[in-house]
Amino acid sequence: MQTQKDQPQVQGPSGPRRLDARTWSGPWCLLKIISHLKRLPPGGRLEVWVKDPMAVAVLPRLLPANDSRLVQTRDHGGYHSFLIQRGRDK
């Protein structure tokens, strides 16, 4: 059963979904991000906030394997944000 906290937050009718993963770490963080990304429609965007250094380093390299791409990344001083666009279904 999923909780409200596990659901990405929608930012307006046409904005990206937002996932706050700052409290998650290690492989769990990456698995949750990929899981949320796969739930988006093709071309959909997900903004992810992470603090885990491993996720910051590995996430951009995982995206091509999931047919997705990194649109933007920002360092906010205490966490990083990634804007990811889901690829098309094969």
Image: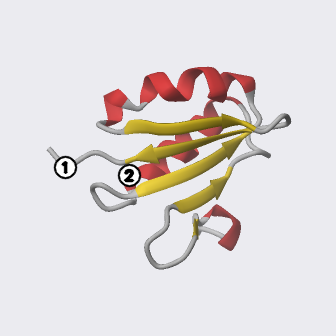
Residue type at numbered disc 1: Asp
Left-right relation of 55 to 84: right
Residue 63 in picture, x, y percent from top left: 41, 32
- Residue 43: image quadrant is bottom left
Mark 1 surroundings within 10 Å by alpha-carbon count, few (fewer than 14), some (14 through 19), many (20 or more):
few
Residue 71 in picture, x, y percent from top left: 45, 40
Left-right relation of 33 to 29: left
Q: Who comes first in sequence, dot 2 or dot 1? A: 2
Residue 21 in picture, x, y percent from top left: 69, 48
The quadrant the N terminus occupies is bottom right
Task: Count the marks.
Answer: 2
Residue 89 in picture, x, y percent from top left: 19, 49
Q: Residue at x 64, y 29 (%)?
A: 55
Quickly name the residue at label 1: 89
State the residue lying farthest toward the left: 90
Does residue 70 sit above or below 42 in this rendering? above
Q: Residue at x 59, y 59 (%)?
A: 18
Tell me, for residue 30, which label it has, or none: none
Q: Which residue is drawn at 58% across and 64% down?
A: 8
The quadrant the C terminus occupies is top left
Disc 2 is placed on an element classified as: helix
Quickly name the residue at label 2: 38
The reply to whether callout 2 and callout 1 are in contact (CB within 8 Å) is no
Residue type at numbered disc 2: Lys
Q: Which colour scheme is used?
A: secondary structure
Q: Which residue is drawn at 61% across and 48% down?
A: 48
Label 2, label 1: how far apart the Cα atoms are: 10 Å
